[in-house]
Amino acid sequence: EVQLEQSGAEVKKPGESLKISCKGSGYSFTSYWIGWVRQMSGKGLEWMGVIYPGDSDTRYSPSFQGQVTLSADKSTSTAFLQWSSLKASDSAIYYCVRGDSLFEYWGQGTLVTVSS
Amino acid sequence: EIVLTQSPGTLSLSPGERATLSCRASQTVSSSYLAWYQQKPGQAPRLLIYAASSRAAGTPDRFSGTGSGTDFSLTISRLEPEDFAVYFCQRYGGSRTFGQGTKVEIK
């Protein structure tokens, strides 16, 4: 069974750094793209970017380029989404998804709250 | 960039009724690259339909997708209590654009 298990909720202050994770299981982690989707409170879905764990090829949405960094660790089948300096506007639920652009499998989501 | 506009914003219906949701694209979308997702409160979205009309694994046959070019629709033939949710369309294959969603609520 394909599963994407995300790390738990985070509460951070503006300016702090953060790295959240998504562990894949039940499939060959290095053979599928892993993407990230943002959902701000009560809002729609925004694609952020994707990474191919096999060779770390990474593609970002223009809206998120330079704002976040995607990475992956093949040894632990885990993908990461990180911020170097959080803003209040980064408060949202972040979902990891399997696939380059069609998202058949989703993680349960990680709630990130940024507040002073 | 293609913009997807969903209508109506909210659809108020009773169980057993038929629901028709619309997704209009600002440019032609190959029907091979239009998907629909369902999201229930507190849950991650779930893929329902891909390639405009193909049901994903586990999608009940009361859900059907149609359309081509710039106009697509998702129809739920007879609403079950578990179908009241938010539905998003998505263009995939190039840009990964989502529509803003349609909420199907109990009347």
Image (tube, coloured by chain):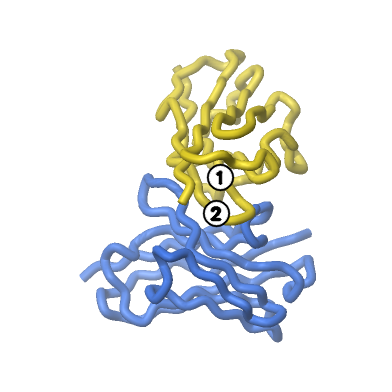
Chain colours: A blue, B yellow
* Res. A79 in view: yes
Q: Which mark sits nearer the N-terminus, 1 or 2?
A: 1
Classify residue A70 as left or right of residue A57.
Answer: left
Q: Residue at x 30, y 68 (%)?
A: A114
* Residue sticking out furthest to the bottom: A75
Report x, y in % for residue B33: 65, 45
Q: Amino acid at mark 1?
A: Gln
User: Label 1: which residue?
Assistant: B90
State left or right for residue B57 relative to residue B98.
right
Mark 1 closeness class: few <14, some 14–19, many ≥20 residues within 10 Å: many
- Residue A67 percent across, percent down from the top left: 38, 73
Q: Identify the mark at residue B96; answer none if there is no mark.
A: 2
Secondary structure beneath label 1: strand
Task: Kindly report the distance in space between the C-alpha atoms of the residues bearing marks 1 and 2.
Answer: 7 Å
Residue under the point 34% across and 70% down: A11
Q: Image height check: is B2 above or below A83?
A: above
Q: Chain of mark 1?
A: B
Residue A15: % across, % down: 26, 79
Estimate the x, y position of residue B58 in percent, counting from the top left.
75, 40
